[in-house]
Image: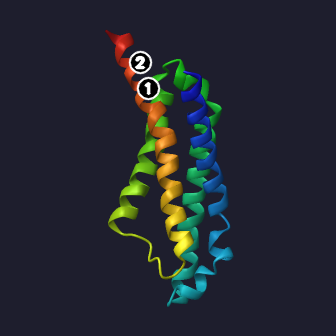
Amino acid sequence: MKKYQIMYYVGAAISLLVGLWHFTVPWMFGWASYIPYETLVVPINYVNLCFSFLLSGLSLTVILWGKKVFVQNPEVFYLYGFLLALWIFRVVVEVIYPCPPESNVWMSYGQFGGSVLVCVLLLVPFIRVASTRKNRKK
């Protein structure tokens, strides 16, 4: 069970770091220069800030309540499942609508690879905890 806990905490920590890093992305990469209408800059920044806040908060909550996941607390398990669903959604969206690699190849593949990594790090412990929950109910 220890390796599953390590995977869980590493996946959640990377998720938290992505959320915190995402606060700075519009300014690091000059998003405003790519947006044709100036009136869209502020709303897009608002969406990014809200997403960053929610991802950071959800990841931090999952980290702080980590022990409760492994002692079968159903509410925390569902919260963890929601974070996992977010990362699965991220991977699926990237497969369907890939980031154009001509803009920055390493960034495109790095984002996808990082998303898959976080997804796997969160998915494996989720399956383990879900299977032990089923066995306890029997």
Q: How many marks?
A: 2
Q: Position of residue 94 (x, y in %)?
A: 40, 63
Label 2 with label 1: CB-CB less than 8 Å: yes
* Amino acid carrying mark 1 in the image: Arg
Identify the image quadrant of residue 41. bottom right
Q: How is the image coloured?
A: rainbow
Measure how far apart labels 2 and 1 are at the Cα level. 6 Å
Nearer-the-camera pick, 118 or 63 = 118
Q: Position of residue 117 (x, y in %)?
A: 51, 49
Dot 2 falls on a residue whose secondary structure is helix
- Which residue is pictured at 41% across the width and 18% down the height? 132
- Within 10 Å of disc 2 (Cα), the crowding (few <14, some 14-19, many 20+) is some
Nearer-the-camera pick, 101 or 86 = 101
Dot 1 falls on a residue whose secondary structure is helix
Q: Position of residue 36 (x, y in %)?
A: 50, 90
Identity of the residue furthest to the top in this view: 138
Residue occupied by mark 2: 132
Identify the image quadrant of residue 98. bottom left
Residue occupied by mark 1: 128
Question: The C terminus appears in which quarter of the rendering?
Answer: top left
- Which residue is pictured at 36% across the width and 63% down the height? 95
Lateral position of residue 5 relative to residue 119, left or right: right
- Which residue is pictured at 62% across the width and 74% down the height? 26
- Which residue is pictured at 61% across the width and 56% down the height? 18
Residue 19 is tagged as: none
Question: The N terminus appears in which quarter of the rendering?
Answer: top right
In the image, is residue 69 above or below residue 19? above
* Amino acid carrying mark 2 in the image: Thr
In the image, is residue 53 above or below residue 69? below
- Within 10 Å of disc 1 (Cα), the crowding (few <14, some 14-19, many 20+) is few
Nearer-the-camera pick, 77 or 42 = 77
